[in-house]
Amino acid sequence: MSTPATAPLLTRPDGSPVRALVVDDEPALVELIQLALRYEGWQVETATDGASALAKARSFAPDVVVLDIMMPGLDGLEVLGRLRASGNDVAVLFLTAKDAVADRIVGLTAGGDDYVTKPFSLEEVVARLRALLRRSGHAVSGYTDPVLRVGDLTLDEESYEVTRAGRAIELTAKEFELLRYLMRNPRRVVSKLQILDRVWSYDFEGRSSIVELYISYLRKKIEADGPPLIHTVRGVGYLIKPAA
């Protein structure tokens, strides 16, 4: 995930980079999300506790906040409550425990805009943040077309539809995220580690074999009626490019 973004997908209306604040008491998770958002071309500040989060929100004036609900001391719900009480209407994406249904309901009721459950994929977090920013009007797209294209393969990031030569292709959520990551990096070799960082949960534990498995799933679906698009670069990773 060290490869820099070629261009920010979203910017503020004045053309400056989107500002994101990432708040979680797990430093490793904060770092991963920070890297993913910087890859988008965004400015990112981080905090590992509620008090620091409030201070950063005042000084940094973020356009969107990634906020963990369960933190010691001042938790995410209290942070959100204080932000809203001060008149701050920044878009907030909550991070919640997988089985904490009540927390999700309370978080949305308290003024949160969306949530993802742990463990999650970084690609999902980025997609949800982009959607929040577009809805809030705090950012505008650097691209007018939500459809990604590689040869005769198309992927619509808004409708989640995938077609090849006009034929609809049904993908699982994880297959879609993997294909989207490849198509957002056409002709660029991405390593298994980069794919795991971007598409799988942050606690993937180095299971690179899962990438090989899902690449095989994708190939069977998108290359069933046409020449290969996804190529293996032995010892390096994978890339997608139009058929010759």
Image: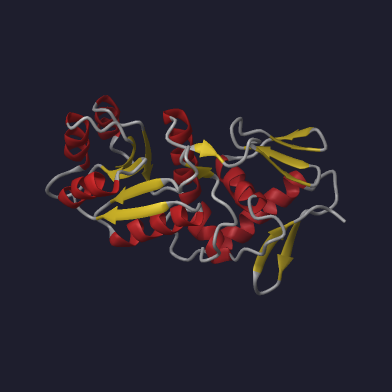
Q: Quarter of the image holding residue 212? A: bottom right
Front residue of 117/53: it is 53
Q: In this view, does 239 lie to the left or right of 135?
A: right
Residue occupying the point 30% across, 28% down: 108
As drawn, the residue found furthest toward the bottom would be 235
Whether residue 208 appears in this view of the structure is: no
The image shows residue 219 at horizontal and vertical percentages of 73, 51
In the image, 163 versus 92, the foreground residue is: 92
Q: Which residue lies most toward the right here? A: 244
Q: Name the residue rendered at 55%, 64% in the picture.
A: 3
Along the line of sight, the residue nearer the viewer: 46 or 19 = 19
Counting from the top left corner in percent of width and height, residue 76 is at: 22, 41
Q: Nearer the viewer, residue 187 or 108?
A: 187
**Rendering quarter of residue 232:** bottom right
- Name the side, left or right, on which 73 lies relative to 33: left
- In the rendered structure, the answer to whether residue 30 lies left or right of residue 206 reads left
Residue, x 26% and y 32% (percent of image)?
Answer: 107
